[in-house]
Amino acid sequence: MNMSPYEPELEGDIATESEDEVRHPPMYRVLLLNDDYTTMAFVVEILVHVFSKSHSEAERIMILVHREGAGLCGAYPYEIAETKVDTVHHLARENGFPLKCIMERDES
């Protein structure tokens, strides 16, 4: 009889159960919305500094915002998405722009 508290045959079962229970948090898409007053340069600046986009990627997204009415900045867990939306609104107000940023649950 083995008196060791270590029982390797149970370890695999426990690890498998834990892995099955892990759930990733839902992601939220953050979008910039077009308006007639915010400059394209400011939108690019927001994309570079708040969303860590390269200058060329920021320009591509800015053009989408301008042409399509909205542009996807990224998908993040709820708290991060909320912070990015708040940061955009704060910077826009601080600079005299009405730029709007929204978040929506990513259903994909």
Image (spheres, grey):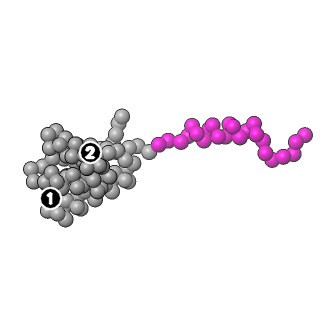
Q: Is residue 69 left or right of residue 58?
A: left
Q: CA distance from mark 2 to mark 1?
A: 22 Å
At which x and y percent is residue 25?
44, 45
Label 2 Cα neighbours within 10 Å, binned few <14 / some 14-19 / many ≥20? some
Instruction: Report x, y in % for residue 85.
Output: 28, 54
Task: In the displayed orientation, state which residue is furthest to the left.
Answer: 36
Q: Quadrant of residue 96?
A: bottom left
> Percent from the top left, x then y, of residue 33?
19, 47
84 left or right of 63 in image: right
Q: Residue at x 37, y 47 (%)?
A: 76
* Residue under numbered circle 1: 97
Q: Amino acid at mark 1?
A: Phe
Residue toward you, 38 or 102: 38
Q: Which residues are magenta?
A: 1-24
Q: Quadrant of the N terminus?
A: top right
Residue 81 at least partly seen:
yes
Q: Is residue 36 magenta?
A: no
Residue closer to the observer: 49 or 83: 49
**Residue occupying the point 60% across, 41% down:** 18
Q: Judging from the image, what secondary structure is the residue with disc 1 in?
A: loop
Q: Please say whether residue 8 is one of the residues in the magenta stretch.
A: yes
Numbered badge on residue 57: 2
